Image (cartoon, helix red, strand yellow):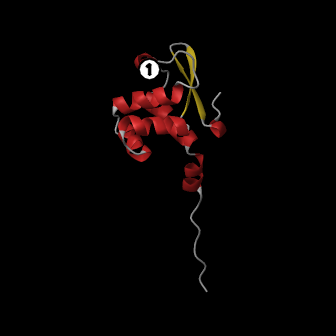
Amino acid sequence: MTNTQRGIVEFKSGGKTYKIKLDVNALCELEEHFDKSTGDILAQIGQMRMVYLRQAFFAGMKNCNDDITLDGIADIIGEMEVPAFEVMELAVNAAFPQDQKAQKKPATRAKTA
């Protein structure tokens, strides 16, 4: 079960259930690996850059699952029941729940005298 309050997203691949969590450690690992900001990395994932997608899955999955390797991530991505980019979008949204609330909050009108 997906627990977005804790930032965890579950998904199925190859008949197994996996978890991904893009916590601070995962995001820092990505920034160090690519020498880019989190925003730049997410933009590259949004442009469907597979090397960024694979590395983001690895960073977010290795602390939630046993025996995860970078090479194994490609097999997991290839056997997902839903598109990998959709799972990553859920993981990003779970990592930044405050951003979602701010986007959904209706704009307030200024009162006129």
Q: Residue at x 55, y 45 (%)?
A: 96
Q: Residue at x 44, y 22 (%)?
A: 77
Q: Residue at x 45, y 28 (%)?
A: 84
Give the total number of marks visible in the rendering.
Answer: 1
Q: Secondary structure at mark 1?
A: helix
The spot of residue 24 in percent (x, y) is 54, 40
Q: Residue at x 39, y 34 (%)?
A: 33
The spot of residue 106 in percent (x, y) is 58, 61
In the displayed orientation, state which residue is furthest to the bottom: 113
The spot of residue 26 in percent (x, y) is 51, 34
Give the residue at mark 1. 73
Is residue 59 left or right of 94 when viewed as pictured? Answer: left
**Which quadrant holds residue 108?**
bottom right
In the displayed orientation, state which residue is furthest to the top: 15
- Asked whether residue 67 appears in the rendered view, the answer is yes
- Asked whether residue 89 appears in the rendered view, the answer is no
**Which quadrant holds residue 103?**
bottom right
**Viewer-closest of 3 and 27:** 27
The amino acid type of the residue labelled 1 equals Ile
